[in-house]
Image: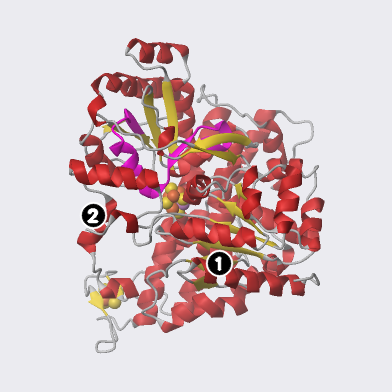
Amino acid sequence: PRPIDELTIWDDAKAMLKKARREGVETVHDRLDQQTPHCKFCELGTTCRNCTMGPCRVSEKRPRGVCGADADVIVARNFGRFVTGGAAGHSDHGRDLIEVLEAIVEGEAPDYKITDEGKLFRLAGEVGIETEGRELMAVAEDLMECFFADFGSRKKSVSLLSRVPEVRKEKWAKLGMTPRGVDREIAEMMHRTHMGCDNDAPNTLIHAARTALADGWGGSMIGTELSDVIFGTPTPKMSTANLAVIKEDKVNLLVHGHNPVVSEMILAAAREPEMVARAKELGATGINVAGLCCTGNELLMRQGIPMAGNHLMTELAIITGAVEAVVVDYQCIMPSLVQISGCYHTKFIDTANKARFTGAIHFDFQPRTAMKQAREIVSIAIEAFAERDAGRVEIPGEPIEIMTGFSNEAVIEALGGTLDPLVKAIADGDIRGAVGIVGCNNPKIKHDSLNVGLTKELIKKDILVIVTGCVTTAAGKAGLLVPEAIEMAGPGLKKICGALGIPPVLHYGSCVDNSRIIQLCAALANELGVDISDLPVGASSPEWYSEKAAAIGLYAVASGIYTHLGHPPNILGSETVTNLAVSGLEDLVGASFFIEPDAVKTAEMFDERIKAKRKGLGLSE
Ligand code: NFS
Ligand code: SF4
């Protein structure tokens, strides 16, 4: 096995990897070793399994599959389906929020309510629903219908494109890239990539971009906005991160996955006095709910609950031996967590019929019975406390302070109600630009080395960083999410963030909340009367692994945002597709991907881009 020091930058992770080796528990790193080297054809994207005349593997020697498809067609089809898997994940999550809103409207979800009424009315106004003098529930019903319709086939474009600058929308219309309906684009991609349909790689990629845009400005954005409506729009607050948020003297319940519909209810149940009393009867001092991955981000943003870890910490959290239950909804949940839970007293509980895990305790979690089910789940966690083996508990280090809760609404309020101060700070060059660093961990990359490395390099250059998803925990553990982190930033950021009492790295939420970032970019572009591609901004997913990250990257690029990836998707087997991704898209949508595994070089690339864009806007470099 590879030395532990090469696997991660974190002491808490190293301690748990050592414990895992001592206790004979297999982790993601061991399985990566088993799987290496990977299939070269698959890495290049030149395998096709789309029909049973194949499967086919194309190369210089055998350049066409049985049907005649060449590497360009095969790579484009594979990448198209890859992105579509991600768009489907985010968007189906978004749909689940609409279904909760529907249940609220119909009086079928007694445990949920509309928390941010003002936001619901504002959203309704944005999508053209009459709000004047109308009852809350009547407007909510119309909004629910409007968002359901965004998933279908009867619209010319998804409704929240109302936020996009006109010039950008014209570009999309000309290219055939306007997202019409979320499910429609997803289904059409499956159709196009069936044998004998879209056999022109650039044409397939245009539709991949359209599908990604249906995610960013459709499914994901609806997910974010309705989560705010139902659970409250985030406001700045303090919390903590790393494995030490797990408490030796408490019942520890980790929520993992993406959808706050489950985890919010678990948190509410865990706070009930009867639950706490039962935990105390068993010798615990209380119940500790902590987060993993994106559902952790959702609860962190809105409720301030601590963050135990990101993607590569999920297995390690259980290895502390102090976790009574892991409660999951869907996405990014390694199936290995069931086996690792089995090595300890940990109960692994799944809650979604569309994401079941063999060997898990299953709950078919429904809005109608949410609180009752949440109580049952929390009770399972409490009772497991009695089974904990104190001799196997090891919780490394001390928790690190973080600041969270930066929704666009909160940022604008902090700025005094308008974007003007931000525009001025950008114009003055105190904030030279902004980069959103988002997404995952990947065991092929030293855990969080690039996520943290790039963040540090950028803020030194007075480039504001916005983080979401798994990068949140990385930035937090590195001490970058507190106001004191301005000491690591350049003079401009130090001045502006210092005056506002905010960190130079802002936590914007979960991965669906990347929609907040594109919304901010659109608002800035509208304010300045330019296109999004004219702004001194960028996006990055340094350690990405998932289909969802690819969808996010592509909707960022298609929205006009220059986007970095720490390693390439499986497209290098086609020159046409690769060239389009890293340069050709620039001509079409005004932005492209760039691939760079080094943090310092990546920061320099962003710096160059930001200089050019500032110059284009008539600003100093
Ligand atoms: Ni987004 Fe990556 Fe997953 Fe969240 Fe984390 S791995 S693409 S950050 S938890 S979705
Ligand atoms: Fe092979 Fe063509 Fe079938 Fe793909 S669609 S498996 S390339 S024959």
Badge 2 local density, few (<14 within 10 Å), some, or many (20+)?
some
> Tag 1, which secondary structure?
strand
Q: Which mark is residue 348?
A: none
- Residue 466: x and y in percent read 60, 53
State the separation of the CA atoms marked 2 and 1: 31 Å
Give the color scheme: rainbow, by chain, secondary structure or one colour.
secondary structure
Q: Is residue 399 left or right of residue 352?
A: right
- Residue 68: x and y in percent read 30, 84
Mark 2 and mark 1 lie on one chain; the one further toward the N terminus is 2
Which amino acid, mark 1?
Thr
- Residue 618: x and y in percent read 81, 72
- Identify the residue at image location x=30%, y=21%: 385
Give, as a single range, the part of the protein colored magenta.
Answer: 299-326
Badge 1 local density, few (<14 within 10 Å), some, or many (20+)?
many
Is 75 or 449 nearer to us in this picture? 449
Residue 367 highlighted magenta (yes or no): no
Quadrant of the frame with the N terminus: bottom left
- Identify the residue at image location x=48%, y=54%: 439
> How many dots with numbers?
2
Q: Is residue 184 visible?
A: no
Which amino acid, mark 2?
Asp
> Tag 2, which secondary structure?
helix
- Identify the residue at image location x=62%, y=48%: 485
- Residue 60: x and y in percent read 29, 88
Where does label 1 land, which residue? Answer: 563
Is 543 or 361 nearer to us in this picture? 543
Q: Which mark is residue 30?
A: 2
